[in-house]
Amino acid sequence: MDISYMSSGGKLNPLQAIMDVRHYTLALDVDITKQSISGYTEIDIILLQKTDTILFDLVHFLIVNKINVNKRNSNFFQKGDHIFITNSNGYPPGKHKIKIEYSGKPPVAVKPPWKGGFTWTKDSNGNPWVAINCQLEGGKVYFPCKDHPSDEPNEGADLFITVPAGLTVAGPGLLQNISKPKNNKQTFHWKTNYTISNYCILFNIAKYKIYNRIYTTINGNRVPMQFYVLEADTAYAAHVLDLRERDCKILEKYFGEYPWIKEKMGIVYVPNPGMEHQTMISYGDRFTYKKVNGQDYSDNLYHEFGHEWWANKVTNKDWAHMWIQEGIDTYAEALFFREVAGEVAYDSIINIFKRHIANKKPLVQGEEINSADTYTGDIYVKGAFFMHTLRYVVGDSIFFTTLKKLATDEKYTYNNFVTTDDVEKLFSQQSGTDLKPLFYFYLRTIQILDISVLNKGFNEYEVQFKNLPMNLPVDILTDDGTQHLIITKKSLKIKSSFPPVIDPGSHYLKKILTE
Ligand SMILES: [Zn+2]
């Protein structure tokens, strides 16, 4: 069941480029003993032009038994991880409803959430515990879909998940119904009306106990908070909800109101590190915390929750631009430190990010790059450090209002997607400065500022900026203290009795040669 070859996104197949997914319905019976699933996925699409073939993605381990298009039996074949649905007369443009019946054993996760699939395990009381993760492989690990980040179902998704009676299913959106037990099984109907990434359309199963609370957002809306926790861990639940409330207030301050006010703020406990599953963020860090200025902090809880804004609400159009989701969300962690412990704490976490930057390949390698080719640690840490650089270059007032605009403006959120150029254009426009050279330098190349400090004698130094991408502000520390200069040319003379310290606050990725 090896799916290590598998990735998500990349070059959009022409057969999928003519299709707009509107809605997914998943109805699956989960056989925990056999570790298999059976049922159907119904996909509502709009075809933009006539085609004789409709293409979906589905892992080849799962066998399709029957396909109906608009309630009529259709020809199809599976090849690799694709389903080709064919009609020699062609499917006309417009709306179509495709029902795909299938069954089989979905792939087992090797290292969730990074190497995904299903996790079949038991809790400490011996009850079944099932988790799904598929960010880097896509929803096709267990349901037929158009596996590309650029197409989310605009009208949401319905999940009808049947499990042994006594177990609970945690899913996206709002729980509509739990069926009465029949043959010792129950069906949970979860429904989200929001647009959602295919890797977030999933569920977890366990003997959960549910803790409820109401959260009042920054705009005064009341949203149900729900924590699906194992019975053995109920003693930890209230504190997790306390932390979620505090974290939400910080994230709302910087990025605007919690994005899913019509549904819920969910947390589900899973047997792996957490994941940004929309409205049901998973968490698995064993209730361990760091102390930040005397307060408990879990980067796992906070980071995954930050993705409700950066990934779920603001979504990259393609994995080529994944740094927007991971880098800005990682930067949000530094903003937690700024809020709770001040600028020095912010700087210290930024410096930790900086030390982890590998800088082996550019964060953005082009367009339509798949998840496997894009995914590196740098999309987190170099992406976050780039936001730190941007903050310095445009100044706090423009930086924070622009970042909030990116997270709240309709143009960049929900049904719309973002690319690196969208982020650049917004910051350029808001700052009145063409920032394209800076974005290009740090995001599309592995260059860093190359600076030489040459001793010219008589307390004079020449500072050379060998690859300055554009006019940039730089702090320089000399006998006279720290001067804030705008560097416009490749070389400048500085008076100092000691070698001037360039960028003492560490706002840029750079190398400095002092001679
Ligand atoms: Zn993340």
Image (cartoon, rainbow, N blue to C red):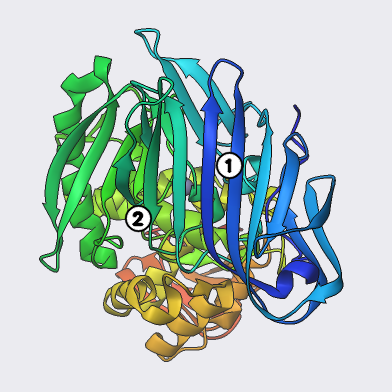
Helix, strand or loop status at disc 2: helix
Callout 1: 10 Å neighbours few (<14), some, many (20+)? many
Helix, strand or loop status at disc 1: loop
| Residue lying at 34% horizontally and 36% vertically, measured from the top left | 179
Query: Going by the image, does 242 lie left or right of 124?
Result: left
Q: Of residues 72 and 365, which is closer to you in this image? A: 72
Amino acid residing under circle 1: Cys
Instruction: Determine whether 466 is above or below 82 in the image.
Output: below
**Residue at the outermost top position:** 125
| Quadrant in which the N terminus appears | top right
Callout 2: 10 Å neighbours few (<14), some, many (20+)? many
Number of residue marks: 2
Instruction: Determine whether 411 is above or below 454 in the image.
Output: below
**Image disc number at residue 134:** 1
Which of pointers 2 and 1 lies earlier in the amino acid sequence? 1
Q: State which mark lies toward you, 2 or 1.
A: 1
Instruction: Determine whether 301 is above or below 21 in the image.
Output: above
Res. 129 visible in picture: yes
Residue 489 % position (x, y): 57, 85
Residue 295 % position (x, y): 16, 36
Amino acid residing under circle 2: Ala
Residue 76 % position (x, y): 82, 54
- In the picture of the structure, the residue carrying the numbered disc 2 is 332
Instruction: Determine whether 274 is above or below 461 in the image.
Output: above
Q: Of residues 47 and 134, which is closer to you in this image? A: 47
| Residue lying at 35% horizontally and 26% vertically, measured from the top left | 181
